[in-house]
Amino acid sequence: MKIGTDGVLLGAWAPTTNHPFSVLDIGTGTGIIALMLAQRTNAEQIDALEIDEATYEQAVDNFENSPWSDRLFCFHAGLDEFIEEPEDEYDLIISNPPFYSEDFKSNNAQRDLARFQDAMPFEDLIEAADLLLSENGIFAVIIPFKEEEKFLALATEFELYPFKITHVKGTPTTEIKRSLLALSRNETTDLVVDELIIEIERHVYTPEYIALTKEFYLKM
């Protein structure tokens, strides 16, 4: 699978102000977000979860060939299986979940599994975060902007509250496409909401996007 902008955005943006010791990347795909967190933090335990076998094997290969192979571990399991007997709490839980909720599917079963919301409903993801998040942990996700209100309402039911939200636009003139959300167990009155524009025009990136992601690109 190709590396998508959503994963890069989340991996670069996710708050690490609590200096996480342990990180969990749910639905890691090829492992890009877990690898970015290994680069960004001193976390000693970075676990990743991937249900698709071929993608899991690619993530394992990427982990083993990275400079942080001793800190990265990938589980080949679904989220429901993983939380049956939770052994650890995590200081940072991060996910770029499959969220296409449209009623059509392609002829590629692997791509469908990665892209469609029925592979990982928001309810399941939030419930898992509530179960696995440490007391001062951070839960960070990227979702479609149109799903933000629903996601935050579900999170509130599990007493997980946003403290930072960034709305992402492709260009200055396009609509908001994505929401980057950071939540914790602590309800705050100091919610930070801002906006990030990726491109001024095709392949001309904004200074803000470059500043956020330049540590992860060979050419930017």
Image (cartoon, rainbow, N blue to C red):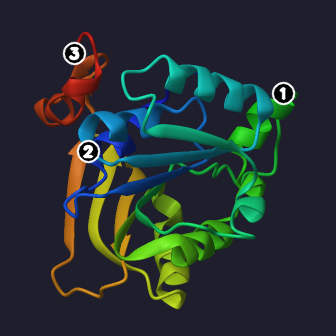
Mark 2: which secondary structure? loop
Circle nearer the N terminus (1, 2): 2
Asked whether residue 142 is in view, the answer is: no
Q: Tell me where residue 63 appears, x and y as whole percent.
A: 51, 26
| Residue 118 x, y percent position in the rendering | 77, 57
Q: Which mark is residue 42?
A: 2
What's the residue type where badge 1 is placed?
Asn
Residue depicted at 23% across the width and 64% down the height: 18
User: 104 above or below 123?
Assistant: above
Q: Identify the amino acid type marked 2.
A: Asn
Is 201 positioned to the left or the right of 79 in the image?
Answer: left
Q: Residue at x 22, y 18 (%)?
A: 204
Mark 1–mark 3 contact, CB under 8 Å? no
Q: Nearer the viewer, mark 1 or mark 2?
A: 2
Which residue matches tag 3?
Answer: 220
| 94 vs 46, nearest the viewer | 46
**Distance between mark 3 and mark 2 Cα atoms:** 25 Å
- At label 2, counting other C-alpha atoms closer than 10 Å, the crowd grade (few under 14, some 14-19, many 20 or more) is some
Q: Which amino acid, by three-letter code, is at mark 3?
A: Met
Quadrant of the frame with the N terminus: top right
* Relative image position of residue 161 (x, y in whole percent): 37, 81
Q: Position of residue 66 (x, y in %)?
A: 42, 21
Check disc 3 and report its element: helix, strand or loop: loop
Quote the CA–CA distance across marks 1 and 2: 38 Å
Determine whether 67 is above or below 25 in the image: above
Q: Give the label on residue 72, or none.
A: none
Disc 1 on helix, strand or loop?
loop
Residue with the mark numbered 1: 108
- Residue drawn at x 43%, y 49% is 45
The reply to whether the C-beta atoms of the residues labelled 1 and 2 are less than 8 Å apart is no
Residue 75 shows in this picture: yes
Q: CA distance from mark 1 to mark 3?
A: 32 Å
